[in-house]
Amino acid sequence: MLLNFYGLTILTDPVLFRLIGADTCVGTIGAKRLVAPALSPAQLPPLDLVLLSHAHMDHMDFATLRALPGKPKVVTASATEDLFKGTRLYPQTLAWGEKARVRTERGDLEVRAFEVKHWGARWKYDKQRGFNGYVLSREDKKLIFGGDTAWTSSFSGLRSEGPYELAIMPIGAYQPWVCSHCTPEQAVRMADAAGAKTFLPIHFKTFPLGREGAVEPLVRLEATLEPERLGWREIGETLQLAQA
């Protein structure tokens, strides 16, 4: 997701090349994209913050991170900072319940990490690493970035700190991985529990990660969510929220 949040440019879990997987001396080896990214790294505007939910290869892609323009701030999950050795990025890590004030030339942003239901190890025998959802706060407005999660009641705990203009929620890779990826219906229930006004689906139609295929997640989402709350249907679309 590329966000313009009251003048601050934020990029979430960027993966902007053809493949995801092992980062080797001969390039990336792994799964191929189903659809081209909306923008290449060279087409991105100057970035203020790169927000990373966890260390899985379809969320933390080092080929993309090395290609990003400028020197943006980076916020990531706990126990992932060692992965950035050899890059020009210096991440700030957050555990559940922790928050940080990100200061940029264009203003400040508060980022708070909250609990989701997933897992964080990058490799099968890797150490256990953190995995976060985030609440972003600026100009008295708040957004939710759900990262990657299975069904969890933790979103209901966000409601008292709302309202939230937008919830960015994963809706794919639930078949057969529902223990770590929510269904579209569960994603809506979690966004509703938090009290989010608009729902923006992610984590579908990009890589062949789940057996449900590229079409089913959006079909199920459209059958569950009120049409006026759905932020987009196609990768590359732009959503503009009306300012109060």
Image (cartoon, grey):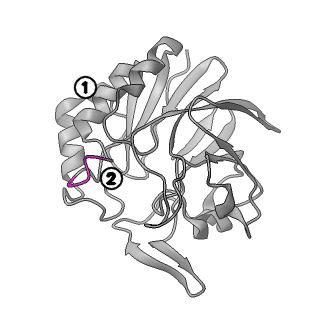
Locate residue 153 relative to residue 161 in the image: left or right: left
Q: Where does the image place residue 177, in percent across and percent down from the top left?
A: 26, 53
Locate residue 91 relative to residue 41 in the image: left or right: right
Q: Which residue is mark 2?
A: 204
Which mark is on residue 226?
A: 1
Question: How many other residues sit within 10 Å of disc 2, few (<14), some (14-19) or many (≥20)?
Answer: many
Measuring 16% from the left and 34% from the top, which residue is drawn there?
A: 223
Q: From which residue to which does the magenta span run? A: 175-179
Measuring 35% from the left and 26% from the top, which residue is drawn there?
A: 153
Q: Quadrant of the C terminus?
A: top right
At label 2, which amino acid type do we have? Phe
Height in image: 194 above or below 71?
Answer: above
Question: How many other residues sit within 10 Å of disc 1, few (<14), some (14-19) or many (≥20)?
Answer: few
Q: Nearer the viewer, residue 140 or 94?
A: 94
Measuring 67% from the left and 20% from the top, which residue is drawn there?
A: 139
Locate residue 7 relative to residue 126 in the image: left or right: right
Q: Where does the image place residue 170, in percent across and percent down from the top left?
A: 36, 43
Measuring 36% from the left and 27% from the top, which residue is drawn there?
A: 191
Res 99 → quadrant: top right
Asked if the residue at tag 2 contacts the one at tag 1, i.e. Cβ–Cβ closer than 8 Å, the answer is no
Q: Is residue 178 magenta?
A: yes
At label 1, which amino acid type do we have? Glu
Q: Nearer the viewer, residue 215 or 191?
A: 191
Magenta-highlighted stretch: main secondary structure? Answer: loop
Height in image: 7 above or below 126?
Answer: above
Which label lies toward us, 1 or 2? Answer: 2
Q: Where does the image place residue 104, in percent across and percent down from the top left?
A: 79, 39
For marks 1 and 2, the one nearer the N-term is 2
